[in-house]
Image (cartoon, rainbow, N blue to C red):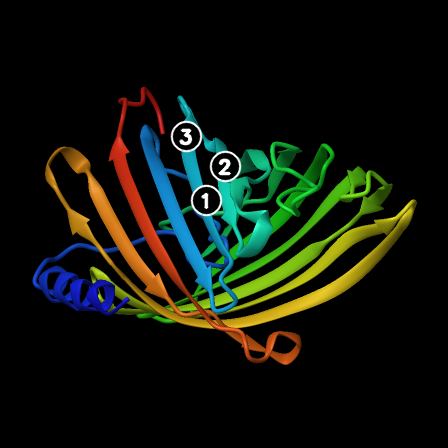
Amino acid sequence: MTRLLSAFFLLITAALAQVGPIQDNSFLAEEAYNQEPGVVQHISTFTHQSDGTWAYTFTQEWPVPDHWRNQLSYTSSALGASGNAGMGWGDTLINYRYQLIGSGETRVAFAPRASLILPSGSSYWSRGFGGTGAQFALPLSVVLTKNVVSHWDLGVSIIPHATDAAGDHGTLRPWYAAHSFVWLVKPRFNALVETAYFNNETVVSARRTSHSGQLFVSPGVRWAYNLSHGLQIVPGVGVPIGAGPSSGQAGVLLYLSFEHPLWKESEK
């Protein structure tokens, strides 16, 4: 971890010498900016918690050609834990998002999302819901001042036939709420403070479920490199710290995004 932090500070120093703005995803809260016309994005996140569990996600976002307000994406994941659980694939999300209000160039942006949850993870090892479901999210982004942007995110999932390790079935409705403040310290260097609450739900027996909550506050930073041919690389680091029901937990979150134009639009 010491080597990672040393490299992190070296990268920041180089990034501060460059110019040009960042407009990228937060780490815990979903921002309400669809991809620009013809521009695709590839996002990786890795989170490691103090209890030894970790999660890796990969998301690829594509605007619909000539209809940039419509965006398609998918998110795949891998999860790991200590002990017999080991590591393996998590569930997969197929996402559709519509830019209902504004864009990345307006003060207010709103882009509701609907996702199909595919049960690619093992419910036996607690890496998935064990059933097909849907997720709905309402991300809202607001420019508060010249240097401060706020992002709000509320989401709920519905899994009608979730399965536990014993093979029992039940209906799950987990939800989450997240918020982030982004301080535009420099055009290519941002500081973030994010808060996220997760209301988790699991099947415990036939048609019976159990609830548990998780609350995290995560300070972080991100910086950007603008390279030739429109390629932008955005690394980032966050430190999720447990609060309330998650007191005593802590972790590190690593973020890496590649964004680049792939085709030219006939209209915007």
Which numbered dot is residue 84?
none
Q: Residues within 10 Å of mark 3 (few under 14, many from 20)?
A: many
For the point 52% across and 67% down, the residue is: 51
Whole-Å distance between the Cαs marked 1 and 3? 17 Å
Residue type at numbered disc 2:
Ser
Q: Residues within 10 Å of mark 1 (few under 14, many from 20)?
A: some
Q: Which residue is mark 2?
A: 76
Q: Which quadrant of the figure contains the N terminus? A: bottom left
Does residue 37 appear left or right of residue 233 in this picture? right
Residue type at numbered disc 3:
Trp
Does residue 143 appear left or right of residue 129 in this picture? left
Which numbered dot is residue 57?
1
Are circles 1 and 2 on residues that touch, CB within 8 Å?
Answer: yes
In the image, 93 versus 139, the foreground residue is 93
Q: Give SS at disc 1.
A: strand
For the point 32% across and 19% down, the residue is: 266
Regarding residue 71, the answer to whether it shows in the image is no
Q: Nearer the viewer, mark 3 or mark 2?
A: 2
Which numbered dot is residue 62?
3
